[in-house]
Each structure stands twice: as C-alpha cells, then as structure tokens.
Amino acid sequence: MAEFTHEVDADGIATITWDVPGKAMNVMTLQGFQELNDIIDTVLSDDAIKGAVLTSGKKDFAGGMDLNTLGSLRSEAGDNPAQKLFDFTMQGHQVMRKIERAGMDPKTNKGGKPIACAMPGTGAGIGLELPLACHRIFVADNPKAKIGLPEILIGIFPGGGGTTRVVRKLGLMNASQFLMEGKMVSPDRAKSAGLVDEVVPANELIATAKEWVKNAKDADILKPWDQKSFKFPGGTPFHPAGFMTFVGASAMIHGKTQGVYPAAKAMLSAIYEGAQVPFDTALKIEARWFTNVLLNPSSSAMINTLFLNKTALEKGANRPAGVQDMTVKKVGVLGAGLMGAGIAYVSAKAGIEVVLLDQKMEAAEKGKDYSTGLLDKAISRKRSTPEKKEALLSLITPTDSYDDLKGCDLIVEAVFEDMGVKADVTKAAEAQLDDDAIFATNTSTLPITDLAKASRNDERFIGIHFFSPVDKMNLVEIIKGKATGDEAVAKALDFVRQIRKTPIVVNDERFFYANRCIIPYMNEGWRMVAEGVEPALVENAAKQMGMPLGPLQLGDETAVDLAVKIIKATKAAMGDAYPESPSDDVAFFLHDKGRLGKKTKAGFYDYDENGRRQGLWDGLRDQYPPMEEQPDVTEVMHRLAFSQTLEAVRSFEDGVLMDIREGDVAAILGWGFMPWTGGPFSYLDILGAGRAVEIGDQLTKKFGDRFEVPKLLRDLADSGETFYQRFGTQSDMAA
Ligand code: NAD
C-alpha cells in the first residue's frame, strides 16, 4: 500500500498526502522516498499541474526517519556500509532538492512550480527537513504540535538537509537551539524563530496553502541560498562576525559534551565546512558527516537504547503475555511526603483519580499543595492553564481516612521507610479494597518479599520504585517479590504507561538495580578522596567520561545523611559480610561536620547563601591530603566506569535484571550512566569483552576484589561475542 498518494484539483493543484498505512505517525522509509520522488516527477512534468501542497493524512505531519531503515541499511550493506548509507542519504537529498528547485531553469531561476507544505501537527526530524525543502511552510494552530529536529538527543544529527538548511535560514547562533539542543517548539514559537512561515487555523490549512500556491511568483519560490547575492546569516567562518560565532560554538559544544558525543562534533564540522562551499556541495558534506556518525558505534548504541529499546519497553515489551488490560482508574497513594506528593501529581496529570492519604489531614493537604505549586510554575511558564490546573487538582482527594480508599484498583505506598509502619498501612488499606486490587510499595531498600508478608495476597503485591523528583525522573523500577503474579506486573506496567514513564521489571535483591549500581560509583569516588586522589581529579575524570555528575557532587545532591543511613542499615543487614570501605569514613567525616550536601548548603562542595554550588570544599584536602604523585586520569576513569558497569553485569548474572535492554535504558534514565555509550552493556560491547576483562583484571590486581570480572563477561571474551549478540532482543520501531 502506498505511503504517498496525490490528487489534482480543478485549479491544477496537486495535493500530495503522506499517510503510512498501519502507523499512528508517519515515518520515512526507503519506499516512502521512492514514492515521493515519483509523485514529484509527475507534478513537475505534467503541464496540467500548476503546483502542489504536501500534507499528511494523519493528525500530525511526521515523526521522523524510520530508524529501523537506517539500521537495516547498515547491517545489510555487506562490506561497504559507508557507501550504502552515503548513497541512501544522497538519494534523500536529491528528492528534496528536486522539490526545492521545482523544475526551475538553472540559469534564470525561473519557471519552477510552487510546492507548499501544510503541516496539521507535529513535524520532527525528516518531518521538518522535508517541509524545509518546500517553498513555504504552513502549520495548523494545533496546540499539541511540536516542531523541531531532535536527532542530536539520540546520538545523530539532522542529516536530511536540516543542518544545512536551518543554519542558512537562521544563522548558526539562532539555529543552535534547534540543531545542538534538539529543542521541539510550538507552531507559534517555530514561526517566531523563523523555522516555519505561517500558522493558520486548522480548518483553513489546506485552503490557505493552495491559495498561496495559486498566487506564488518565481521570486517566491527561489530559496535565498540559490540566489547569487546570498549571504550566510551571521557570517561564514572567515567573516569577522562568523569567526567569533564559530570559535565560540566549537568551545561551547566541547564544554557541553566533553568531546564524548561524536554527533555534536560531526554536525559542527558539517556546518563549518559546508558554510564555505555552494549549497549542493554543502549537502554532500552533510551526507558524509552523517554517514560517519551512523557508522560510529556510540551513535548506534544511543539509537538502540534511547530510542528503539526505550520505546519498546514503554510499549510493554516485557508485559506478561495474555493478561487483560489493567489500566488504573483510581489510585490510592499512602503517605503524602516528598514521594507520595509526586506520585499523586503524575497520576492526576495522566487523568487518574487519586486518593492521597496521610496520618493527618494537614499532611495530606500539604501533599496536594505540591501539585498546586508545580502547576502554578507551569502556568507562569505558559506550559499550563488555570483550567488545566483546576481539572488536575479536582482529581486529587486528600484524606486521613482509610475509608476513602474504597474503589481504588491500585495502591502505591510511600510512607516512612520502616517495615513496621509499612506493614500497618498495608493491612489498614487492604481492609478497604476489593480482592482484585493491586498493592504496590515505593520502598527503596526493603525487600518486597518481606513487605508482602503483611499483605492478604502476596501474588497481588509488588514494588513500584520511583526516583526523586518524581515529576522529572522518567525511570520506574518494577520489582517482583518471590510470589508476585503476572497481573500485578501487568498492572504496574499499565500504570507506568499511563503516567508516560519508562518501566523496567527486575527481581527482588538489595537495592534492586539502579541504586545497586550507582552506590559503587559514589563509593569509588569517595574512596579515592580518602586515598589522597585530588577531589578535582575525581570530579573532572567523571565528567570527561560523560557522567552528568561527579561522584562527589552526586553525594551532595542525594545527601550525605542518606548515605550514612544506608551504610548503617546495610552493615546491620550484612553483619560480618559487610565490606568495610574508606569511602564510609568520608561519609561519616562530612556527616559529623554537618556537611550533608546541597540541602545544608555545605557538603563536598561549598555553596553560597542562595544554595548555588561554588568550588570543592578545602576541608576535604586538609582531612585527606592529596598524594604527591597523582594517578593517571585514565585509571581514575576506569575505576569510576567499571565500578558501575561490573555491578550491572553482576545484576544480570544474578538474575535481578532480566533483560540487558532494561539494564541499558535504566542506567541512562536512572542515574545518567554515560549516555554516549548507550548504557553499561552497550559500553562493554563497544569496548569489546576482551579489553573489558583486561581492564577489570588490572583494576582487581591493583585495587581489590570489588573489580573482579564476572564470569559472564569472561565467557563473552572467550567466545568473542558481544552482550547484544548473545542476549539482545530486537526492538522494532513503531513510531
Ligand atoms: P517522607 O518522609 O517525605 O514522606 C513520608 C510520608 O508518609 C510523610 O508525609 C508521613 O507523614 C507519611 N506517613 C508516615 N507514616 C504514616 C502512616 N502510618 N500512615 C499514613 N502516612 C504516614 O518520605 P519520602 O522521601 O517520600 O519516602 C517515602 C518512601 O519512598 C520511603 O519508603 C522511601 O524509601 C521511598 N523512596 C524515597 C525516595 C527519595 O528520594 N526520597 C526515592 C525512592 C523511594
């Protein structure tokens, strides 16, 4: 079935409709490009056709490239994938360039046929690059529409001419929010930024575009960059003003990415080199850099983890088969503290009725006020409206009475982290619930299987572990206790889908998955400080390898008293088996000094009176004098990277983690594991198991057993396989 079709009206204007069968959103495929090309040939060669309007048969224009197409091109290309990817990219350019030149005489630039784009809604990636090749872009005033080029966020860059066109339309400075940050904006903002031309009422979209086509003159369809007088806005690299921008952009990109993201550098190279040559050559340069990025293992790992696998998990890749729809209608949230208030907010935002219970009515109301605060902030930033605020707040009922939980089909418990308190509220709540309700706990450290003992039915008891702050953190860990049944898992997954977060399903072990891996990372950093490694070296090594926060800053953000609490609780639980570590001394030292982190405006770092982070606290170096000879930065990086990565492998080996895709997605979403790697398992695949074993063995020899290489990794090194070859499950893109 065709992805593009066209029909011609009585005025001789063709309407080209993009409507990929069986998909909610258009995505560009090889077939799509071919069909569009054929229709454009018809439009340009048929004398009865005066011009065309390109639009979509769906409520949105298009979501982007079908990323599976890129993946299969690469894997099916045989010995020369670079050529295949480059040729494919150039074919795309040719189709779009054909639209842009529209049959004009190359010498006089006259005689072309006007082709407008009419976007009913969202246009992302190629869904904006294609409109950019048209002569005028009309967008419907659809409040849900988002326009932009988000490619950079998944490790590639706009390679369908978007880079070359947007930078010529807006100049490097103005283009950078779209190209370098991947910002998606409303139609109005896209118009004021100069990305699109007109925003029109939705019901007049096609008529307005047709009217424009009917009246367009030769000059209206000639792009600035095809005119002799064209000047690159803001100046090319050798123009005095352009020079300043390009030098600044290079420094800015390096500062933001630490040089670990190949796509950002490649895009800037494409812009810099392209700015100095004619437009068609610039497109060719863009295609070369795009090919380069597509072949970079970091880019494919990022696409796999941050797009394909993340989407697959959100769509229920690991939902138990055969369980009926378990959509949540009414949720009871027990405990209206930091977490409970956040869980109530995200649930109401998804349109779910919420009963928010605490010991006292004031506490429950305070929990609801948290939503009011977030909504007021959103309104002041024009991200919400007073009507939406009222609608959302009306869904949250604060209470101190368990009776109000009647009719809830899901409970999420977020009271104090105490086995006894949790057992009491479980019993009190379940007394009010129907038999088929599901009870979930948001505990971060207590075993689900033990907590389930208080429940009347441990099959319908589960862990749903949110991260703080709930409204910002998109990962949710779903934890199966020993007896947890499929319906409870399906319920938790359906709930996470409703609140638009990304779920992973893990088994019940100390710290589950994310905390289990992040704690060794923090410990390793703190331990180095105790050993006399310069604190600044520890922090900078972490950032240079692509961690968003160094282990000391992370300690300040999560709070040193929490670390002390966890150390004490773990010691109590493990007894003699607890591995003593100098990192604990560092935690106790800061704790004794009352330096608990950001919240006390004092921790590993100093803070000003407004709580803004200043430099590292000098007292650290006084307490732990730096060694005369400092370690090599690579060694520091390896310690920081392997402490987390090997723990991820152990979690998989132990069966806590059941799917490496979940391990990779959760690592990036949950604790910011070097996103350029695509997650710990992808990182090991990029490194190669053989090299990883070598590094692990060196670290074990020098620093101890905590770096011991898991058997599974050694096996892969012996067999020459990667994690994804042995354990990968193909996630299909279904945009
Ligand atoms: P919090 O202290 O901010 O809130 C706990 C709330 O529970 C308080 O409002 C308290 O009044 C209420 N409460 C206590 N006993 C109650 C009872 N018997 N009946 C009704 N309400 C009662 O704590 P928090 O940070 O929101 O943590 C809650 C749970 O979430 C804990 O299990 C914690 O381990 C877990 N958790 C916390 C984080 C985090 O970063 N804070 C992250 C993930 C999970």
Image (cartoon, rainbow, N blue to C red):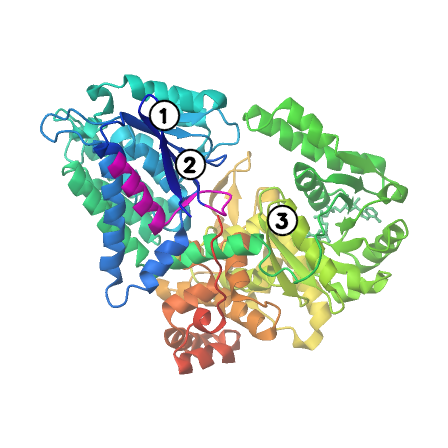
* Camera-nearest label, 1 or 3: 1
Q: Look at 21% across and 42% down and name the residue there.
A: 283
Q: Which residues are magenta?
A: 21-42
Q: Which residue is mark 1?
A: 9
User: Please, what is the three-letter code of the amino acid marked with disc 1?
Assistant: Asp
361 relative position to 253: left or right: right
Q: Which residue is mark 3?
A: 497
Position of residue 451 relative to residue 51, above or below, is below
SS state under label 2: strand
Sequence-first disc among 3 and 2: 2
Q: Could you tell me residue 127's position as x and y percent? A: 39, 39
Q: Which residue is mark 2?
A: 123
* Camera-nearest label, 3 or 2: 2
Residue count near mark 1 (Cα–Cα under 10 Å), binned few <14, some 14–19, many ≥20: few
User: Please, what is the three-letter code of the amino acid marked with disc 3?
Assistant: Arg
Residue count near mark 3 (Cα–Cα under 10 Å), binned few <14, some 14–19, many ≥20: some
Q: Quadrant of residue 720?
A: bottom left
Q: Look at 23% across and 64% down and name the residue there.
A: 80
Between residue 125 and residue 550, name the one nearer to us: 125
Between residue 627 and residue 718, name the one nearer to us: 718
Q: Is residue 551 magenta?
A: no
Sequence-first disc among 1 and 3: 1
Residue at the farthest left position: 107
Q: Could you tell me residue 13's position as x and y percent? A: 32, 25
Q: Tags 3 and 2 in contact by the CB under 8 Å rule?
A: no
- Mark 3–mark 2 Cα distance, whole angstroms, equals 23 Å
